[in-house]
Amino acid sequence: MTDVLSGPVTVTQERRLVTEIPGPRSRALLERRTVTVAAGVGGTLPVFVERAAGGVVVDVDGNSLIDLGSGIAVVSVGNSSPRVVEAVQAQVAAFTHTCFMVTPYEGYVAVCEELARLTPGDHAKKSALFNSGAEAVENAVKIARHATGRQAVVVFDHAYHGRTNLTMALTAKNMPYKHGFGPFASEIYRVPMSYPYRDEAGLTGAEAAARALAVVEAQVGAGNVAAVLIEPIQGEGGFVVPAEGFLPAIADWCRKSGALFVADEIQTGFCRTGEWFACDAEGVVPDLITTAKGIAGGLPLAAVTGRAELMDAVHVGGLGGTYGGNPVACAAALATIETMEEQDLARAARAIEATMLPRLRALQQRTDVIGDVRGRGAMLAVEIVRPGTDEPDPELTGRIARACHAQGVVVLTAGTFGNVLRFLPPLVIGQDLLEEALDVLDAAFTEHATAG
């Protein structure tokens, strides 16, 4: 058991339940939330957080929960990481905002320099900074259309790209993201994803790419495509890892057709998958790459990074936003990158995979409800199905997630069919905590899979 500094307070790295989940103070806050927060703002676990650090979240009732969610892959360096806290405090004391488009500051430039250094490819790159992943994706589409003079954007089954009007159109799943919010932006075309668990047996990545591209050529026309937008490993769609060779084949088609290959690395980026970026695993170099989530240790920051000539194709004033590249968020990002490099958190993600994958596969062997175990690095998932079938079982998935929550382990669900448990632990989580969380998961399956 260790302690981790969170601001002026140390947070003991242990799972400790002192009340039921949620406890009385969290329930009281939930009542206040119900009165004043819009019902459309969803929730996963109704505990209200008081502090967090390392791999632990502490609620207002004093319960310490093991965090296997990282705020949806955001606090990869841990909550209130010391270097991030120090950098943010210093920047807040200096100035909090000027708007980079009015009076610029070095932090924005330094973040763009780091993105040019770290993202795939050794070509000249430039970046523009924004606030959220959806905003980054939307601007990547703007850049692609402006640079190519084309309009069509190709996306994939099971994709998730955001909640703005354009990114809802890019997103595949109806509930809860799109239902009732249309009409949506036009010139968006969806094609089949490589989904090895649900594809026909033996379909290779190259064959899956040919299947998708045949749809593009027949229904859209290669010469009309501005961009092919893809998550190298899908996030909300269920942590779908395409078959080897799928991404390179798509990227190669883009090069030959004049379309831009745009990698949405918002969830996969910044060491999450055991590489700095998921595209690195197969040596794929995107024309444009979007990042957010893990970039700034919990502060809102996002970016589009791309080939310099593409980024410069947009007229002056065509990109930007009042808060984009906020100086405090930029300071946090620079500290986050320093922490990732200093602690080699890409290696830490691979170590998490080495611990979790064998445990998850053993659980699959012990039960008849896990159809697939997949993922890479510290981005792992199990797909839950009805025994003896590949039929999704979202009800059992929800029961197992709630059982983990009740025992003080934060897990998340995902998937087009709502039947995927996804695991995104902080890359700094301790080995003992990780093993204990997996013990809780085992117990939840033992209780609910056999009873279900």
Image (cartoon, grey):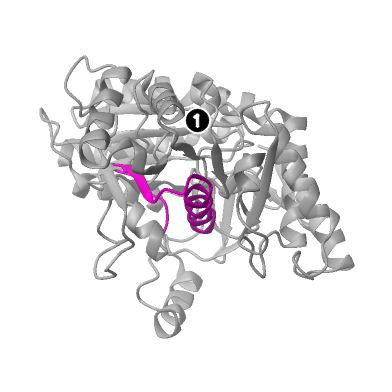
Task: Give the residue type that dot 1 points to.
Answer: Glu
Residues shaded magenta: 133-162
Which of the two residues, 204 or 386, is positioned nearer the viewer here? 204
The answer to whether residue 250 is magenta is no
Query: Which of the 4 quarters of the picture holds residue 27?
Result: bottom left
The vertical placement of 50 against 373, above or below, is below
Q: Secondary structure at mark 1?
A: helix
Which residue is the extreme one toward the left?
388
Residue 18 in view of the camera: yes
Which of the two residues, 368 or 139, is positioned nearer the viewer here? 139
Query: Which of the 4 quarters of the picture holds residue 165?
Result: bottom left
Q: Is residue 141 left or right of residue 307?
A: left
Q: Where is residue 160 shown, x and y percent of the image? A: 37, 49
Q: Is residue 216 left or right of residue 409?
A: left
Which of the two residues, 449 or 324, is positioned nearer the viewer here? 324
Q: Where is residue 118 shown, x and y percent of the image? A: 68, 33
The vertical placement of 276 against 150, above or below, is above
Q: Where is residue 426 shown, x and y percent of the image? A: 58, 40
Residue at x-position 26% and y-position 34%: 217
Rendered-image quadrant of the C terminus: top left
Q: Residues within 10 Å of mark 1 (few under 14, many from 20)?
A: some
Give the number of marks.
1
The vertical placement of 238 against 183, above or below, is above
Residue under label 1: 435
The answer to whether residue 136 is magenta is yes
Rendered-image quadrant of the N terminus: top right
Q: Where is residue 248 shown, x and y percent of the image? A: 43, 22
Residue 352 in view of the camera: no
Query: Which of the 4 quarters of the picture holds residue 159?
Result: top left
Which of the two residues, 7 or 128, is positioned nearer the viewer here? 128
